[in-house]
Image (cartoon, helix red, strand yellow):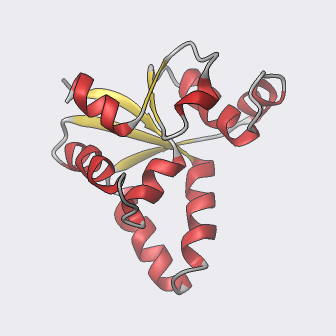
Amino acid sequence: MNSSVFVDTDIVLDLLAKRDPFFPFAAELFTKADRKEINLFVSSLCFSNLNYIVSRQKTASEARKLLATLKVLVTVLPVDDKIIELALHSRFKDFEDAIQYHCALEHGIRILVTRNVRDYKQARISVLTAEQFLINYG
């Protein structure tokens, strides 16, 4: 299969924070990446946000180690001037969602996994929860 999948920050947080009831689906998604069954992508914004969130709950050193472990499983895509322009002029209510969406779109990734599917109503790519992705592509 080896699908390319863009993962929104909320899915990564489900994994790192073991948030129920979402953790098992996030864990399975990242296990598939570890087994090289799928390729996971995140934006550079995701790492910045994760560092901020995780550093509030753990030491800076622990947060960095956790992110280093995560980095092994994902490819980080840049957020550049074009993506910010597209996000600024999009119809997305949530600016971060707009950045994530346009990052995926600009890099040719046709599947975006998030917990906030309803926030991506105007998307031109497949937007699924982790559970939906595993059922449909699993």
- Residue name at image x 77 percent, y 32 percent: 93
View extreme (front): residue = 21
- x and y, in percent, of residue 100 in the image: 61, 36
Image vertical order of residue 12 relative to residue 137, above or below:
below
Quadrant location of the C terminus in the rendered image: top left
Please name whichever residue, 21 or 57, is drawn nearer the observer in this view of the structure: 21
Which quadrant: the N terminus?
top left
Image point (62%, 59%), residue name: 49
For the point 53% across and 30% down, the residue is 117
Image coordinates of residue 122 in percent, x first then y, are 64, 16
Q: Is residue 21 left or right of residue 51?
A: left
Q: Is residue 110 left or right of residue 131?
A: right
Tell me what residue is drawn at x 49 percent, y 84 percent. 61
| Residue occupying the far top of the picture | 124
Q: How many marks?
A: 0
Q: In the displayed structure, does residue 133 sit left or right of residue 128?
A: left
Residue 60, compared with residue 46, is above or below; it is: below
Horizontal and vertical percent for residue 104? 54, 28
Residue 7 vertical placement versus 30 (above, below): above
Provide residue 26's location: percent of width, then percent of height.
33, 49
